[in-house]
Amino acid sequence: MLRSGASGMGEQPRLLHQRSQYGYTQRPSEAMQHEPEAVSVDEQRRITKDAQRAATERNMQLVELASGRIGGELEALAQLALPPALASHVRAMRRQVETMRRKAQNPPRL
């Protein structure tokens, strides 16, 4: 049965199967009762991609905020008269924070 609903014009219905191990079905007799038709595969991909993009942006903002706070504390440590061994740890932590910021600003493509 072809229909034009959530799955689009001329596509088969995409219904949630009664048995979850089967995922979706096109047959109403196998579908969960009182459940709406699922969105199309393309629409689900778009929704997923949008959610991943939003999560990445949110994480970037949180990393930027946290790295600013951490950077301030590392600056305070750097102003102390620390022994060379400790001062080198402060420099190493600064490099790590900067690496984290760069990676957050340029996340891998999804």
Image (cartoon, rainbow, N blue to C red):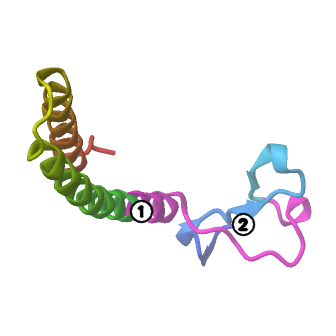
The residue indicated by pointer 1 is 46
Residue at 21 percent across and 42 percent down: it is 97
Q: Is residue 89 magenta?
A: no
Position of the N terminus, as image quadrant, is: bottom right
Residues 72 and 38: in front is 72
Locate residue 83 relative to residue 26 in the image: left or right: left
* Position in image of residue 34 (x %, y %): 86, 78
Secondary element under disc 2, as helix, strand or loop, is: loop
* Position in image of residue 54 (x %, y %): 37, 65
Q: Which residues are magenta?
A: 27-52
Residue at 75 percent across and 50 percent down: it is 23
Residues 48 and 61: in front is 61
Residues 84 and 16: in front is 84
Amino acid carrying label 1: it is Arg
Q: To which quarter of the image does residue 58 belong?
A: bottom left
The residue indicated by pointer 2 is 1
Secondary element under disc 1, as helix, strand or loop, is: helix
Residue at 48 percent across and 65 percent down: it is 43
* Position in image of residue 65 (x %, y %): 26, 63
Query: Real-space Cα distance between discs 1 and 2?
Result: 26 Å
Q: Count neighbours of disc 2 (C-alpha within 10 A) and say few if under 14, some if 14 to 19, many if 20 or more.
A: few
- Please report whichever mark, 1 or 2, sits nearer to the chain's N-terminal start: 2
* Front: mark 1 or 2: 1
Q: To which quarter of the image does residue 61 belong?
A: bottom left
Against 70, residue 98 (above or below) is above
Residue at 74 percent across and 58 percent down: it is 26
